[in-house]
């Protein structure tokens, strides 16, 4: 797998993010000052959000590295790919568990408090808290990060995903809209294809067919040397 896939997943997935987080982006507080501080505030918000993704990448990389050591990474990679494909085929939404609902409630309360502030610090915190909200596309990206097998690669994968979401999310926060609704709808149809591609690559990676980049031989440690 290449980081380009994570970037593409972020680019396409940001259309979903725009629908879910658009109202929040438009409600972000504006630091006192001129237009320069307005733009800087929107940038630091995105910095906070992508920082959370990078921290997730550390955790995912640690998990992938541990699984590689015990020889279970192949099977996890296959299991993750199958789980993603299964999720695409399931049309019914799964209700969030009560603890998750409570956690989301606490996150939203914390975000509400920060929305009342007008400092760069509050914008960074808002971005980091936003990155913690449950999101299916982030979970898909994390699956790819785990399969990378190293901490550095896991962080790099999540950073690439986060950077992929940046143009759309930053554009909305700066202008209120970035693409016409009809064009957004057409592009959103491509999201399942990118997710399906990632799932397929995870399965191929787990099969360890000895194909460089696409399906390296995990048993010989190639996964830790190919980035």
Image (cartoon, rainbow, N blue to C red):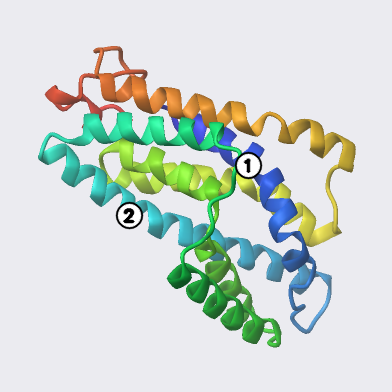
Task: Please indicate whether residue 176 sits to the left or right of residue 101 in the image.
Answer: right
In the rendered view, tell whether residue 184 sits above or below residue 101: above
Query: How many dots with numbers?
Result: 2
In the depicted structure, whether residue 176 falls above or below residue 87:
below
Nearer to me, 182 or 55: 182
Q: Residue sitting at 83 percent across and 70 percent down?
A: 35
x 43%, y 55%: residue? 54
Numbered label attached to residue 116: none
Instruction: Please tell me whether mark 1 sits on a helix, a strand or a loop.
Output: helix
The quadrant the C terminus occupies is: top left
Q: Which mark is residue 13?
A: 1
Q: Hey, which quadrant is residue 209 in on the image?
A: top left
Q: CA distance from mark 1 to mark 2?
A: 21 Å
Left or right of 116 on screen, residue 9: left
Question: Which quarter of the rendering shows the N terminus?
Answer: top left
Residue name at image x 53 percent, y 48 percent: 136
Image position, residue 137 (x, y; %): 54, 46
Q: Position of residue 19 (x, y in %)?
A: 74, 53
Which residue position is annotated with label 2? 58
Observer-side mark, 1 or 2, equals 1
Regarding mark 2 in the picture, which secondary structure is present there? helix
């Amino acid at each position: 797998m290449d980081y380009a896939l994570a970037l593409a997943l972020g680019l396409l997935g940001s259309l979903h993010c725009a629908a879910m987080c658009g109202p929040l982006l438009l409600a972000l507080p504006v630091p006192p000052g001129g237009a320069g501080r307005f733009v800087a505030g929107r940038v630091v918000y995105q910095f906070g959000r992508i920082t959370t993704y990078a921290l997730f990448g550390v955790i995912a990389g640690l998990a992938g590295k541990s699984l590689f050591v015990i020889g279970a990474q192949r099977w996890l990679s296959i299991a993750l790919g199958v789980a993603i494909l299964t999720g695409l085929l399931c049309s019914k939404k799964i209700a969030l568990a009560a603890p998750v609902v409570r956690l989301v409630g606490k996150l939203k309360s914390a975000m509400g408090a920060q929305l009342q502030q007008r400092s760069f610090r509050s914008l960074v915190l808002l971005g980091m808290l936003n990155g913690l909200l449950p999101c299916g596309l982030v979970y898909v990206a994390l699956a790819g990060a785990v399969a990378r097998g190293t901490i550095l690669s896991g962080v790099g994968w999540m950073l690439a995903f986060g950077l992929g979401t940046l143009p759309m999310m930053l554009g909305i926060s700066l202008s209120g809209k970035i693409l016409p609704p009809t064009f957004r709808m057409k592009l959103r149809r491509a999201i399942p294809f990118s997710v399906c591609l990632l799932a397929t690559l995870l399965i191929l990676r787990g099969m360890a067919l000895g194909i460089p980049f696409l399906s390296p031989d995990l048993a010989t440690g190639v996964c830790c040397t190919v980035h």
